[in-house]
Amino acid sequence: MSDAIKPDITMDLKGMACPMPVVKVSQQIKKMQIGQVLAAETTDPGAYADFPAWAKSTGNEIISTDKKENVTTFYIKKIK
Amino acid sequence: MWSKVFYFTMVPMVYAAVAIFIGGLIFKLAVVLFSKRFKGSLATYPKRLPRPVGVAVEALAVPSAFKKDKVFWLFILAFHISFFLLFIGHLELIREFKWIQLIPHEVFLGAGAVGIVLIISVLYFLFRRFRSPWREISVPEDFFILILLFLTMFLGSHLHLSARFYAGGGAFDIPIEAYREYLSSLLALKPVVPDGIAYSPHYVLVALHIFLANLVLILIPFSKVVHMVFAFLSLDLKRK
Amino acid sequence: MEKEKIQELKSILKSRLNRPLRYYTDTCTRCGICYDSCHAFYGIPKKEYSPVGRAEVVRKLLKKYTRPSGFLFPYWGDAMKLGDAVLDQVFEAAWSCTGCRRCMVNCPFGIDTGQIMGVAKHLLIENGTAPEELIMLADAAVEKGKSIDQFKEGYKQVIHDLEKEVQKKLNLPSPDGLIPMEKQGADILYVGLAGAHSIVNPAIIFNAAKANWTLSFFEAVNFGFFAGDPDKTNFIAQRIIKEAMALNVKEVVIVECGTAFRILRALMGKLPFRVSSIVEVIHRYVEEGKVKLNKNSVSEPVTYHDPCQLGRNGGVFEEPRAVIRKIVSDYREMSPTREQNWCCGGGGGLVALDNEDFRIKTGKAKKDQIVATGAKIVVTACENCVSQLKTIKGGYGLDIEVKYLSELVCENLAIQSSE
Ligand code: SF4
Ligand code: SF4
């Protein structure tokens, strides 16, 4: 499924300490335009709950997640 | 006219000041009592001594100051111990107390040294604040209180020393008995300003001393000087 | 500033005036003894970064709006009126303070400048000038608490993957159940963080000790607290408390995160379970012989950084040292140490902010301390501290390795065969 998604920016958040992944993503998202897609690669299991919760509370959308080995990529679309 | 002003300072204002002092402290404590407690613990570790002992040691020996600045610490201790002795000394001006005479001495306790130590310490505290960085963190209150204490203590010390060293010489003629008569009459609620004071050429100095002391009393509950009570309470929180 | 906003800010000032705050407002004599006890001041020596300097900003507001004297004679205590310029000062004070409370142990009255900065942070939230990263993280944590059921399945899936790592490390026959979740009546509810290391290493230790434990769905850290929002702080902490009570556990064990530990241990009042740090639990297992360590297996010089919330504010000083000394042959103490240890400069939510230059500068005290020990490995037990120590390492080009205590323990675990 993710093959179809062309992220505008890809971020490597693997192994970052708490709470850097979410912070970095939201800093990046702020710089992007509405409709663009950010791919965030992480190894954090917590991201499975944190990213969706973050997206929900900030009003962005996770359009897809893709898991390869222990790296998960979240595709986040900027909505507003 | 002036005698009325003096009388006002020496009698009604003293009662008012004492009332404000006591009432103020009670008020302050009541306000604290009725404000929200902190739900958790504000403790810091390690808690080396049992709680009350630890609080007492920290409040009375000020180890934090000792660690930071030995000279400052010396003056802090000198000032606070002397302040306590000063309080006891004034009790002696009310009447003879046996327990104070445990170490026999002529009134007042310390033969004038207490006052001198206080004056020097207060000046040290004051001049310290003229320097950076203490100047930048000081507010008018800090200077005002120190100046007030300096003036009060300076006058008090002067009255005492001159009485002590010129006694009988006639230059300074307010005998100890006059103070005792005055203060015990205040305490008995039958206030008089005895002739020994009222007809002394130095009445003005006595009145001024009393006036300033009244101000100090009034200010204690409403200024940072409440630390004489609150220090124990806030240090206690640290060990809860 | 508009009238309504001033009114709101005033009511916050009033609402925050509890007993400790009253003592702290009235008692400070501006003696200046705390002046240079702050690492921020050590790194950037200006009055605004001294504990009394920053506390005075808030105290002057408290005086103005909650004290008759400040109202009648503002000049007396230099009471200040609310306004944009003042709120900028409030911001500078609050967001340069890590809440490490080193100043508190050095104040003759035990004044907790960290508490006072809590008021400052609260004001900034109301004023709309609080750091948005933290507000956002707090909101996400609240959201997660509200709709946890939606996330449970996905989370369990990834956790299951981690079980294999535990299996590999301990040479166990099967990965299943090595990281239990939602286990009713477990002895321990372990609360980790988002990162895999915060779950895998403790899981290895729990399994090695054959503990009856279960993993929480939530992350231990409390961004509501960092942001300074009392309601969110409470909500975020309650997520864990509720989970622990629903599972009926005896003990909640907190990941290597100082703030999370202190909040649950000291700030939430009495709880129906015991709250421990993973550090204490590791120590307990080692002492009881449930976890065996390879003696003296690290010969490089090692030092330990006391996370402020664990040490000075939590009383966990000896446990980590005892564990490290078992593994390490050349242990070096920092100076000053324990309750006088310098804060790394990353606490209070500061690591989450875009302020690296500031943190490198204010990490100078820590840097100097580390360099003086000559240690090659710096061990600590707090996620924030690790991040900040790495920032310091990068900023000053130090030749050190920063490690979690749990990491050091797992690397040097004496593993028995699976039989
Ligand atoms: S040491 Fe305590 S009393 Fe002295 S200035 Fe600092 S906070 Fe105030
Ligand atoms: S709590 Fe720590 S960071 Fe804050 S003022 Fe005190 S010493 Fe500085």
Image (cartoon, rainbow, N blue to C red):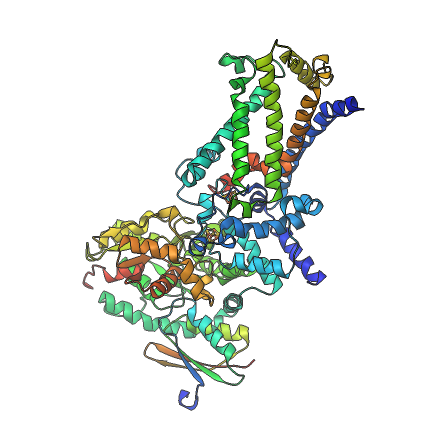
Q: Position of residue C371 (x, y in %)?
A: 30, 56
Q: Is residue B135 above or below residue C221?
A: above
Q: Is residue C355 left or right of residue B25?
A: left
Q: Pick the residue in front: B104 or A72.
A: B104
Q: Pick the residue in front: A23 or C78.
A: C78
Q: Pick the residue in front: C250 or B61.
A: B61
Please identify the quadrant where the C terminus of chain C is shown: bottom left
In which quadrant of the rendered view does residue B216 lie?
top right
Q: Is residue C410 above or below residue B155?
A: below
Q: Pick the residue in front: C33 or C212.
A: C33
In which quadrant of the rendered view does residue B147 lie?
top right
Residue at 57% x, 47% y is: C21
Q: Position of residue C80 (x, y in %)?
A: 64, 52
The reply to whether residue C401 is in sight is yes
Residue at 79% x, 23% y is: B4
Residue at 59% x, 27% y is: B153
Please identify the quadrant where the N terminus of chain C is shown: bottom right
How many numbered marks, from 0 up? 0
Q: Position of residue C14 (x, y in %)?
A: 64, 51
The reply to whether residue C179 is in sight is no
Residue at 55% x, 48% y is: B136
Q: Which residue is at the far top?
A: B168
Q: Is residue A30 above or below residue B151?
A: below
Q: Position of residue B240 (x, y in %)?
A: 48, 42
Q: Is residue A14 left or right of residue C112?
A: left
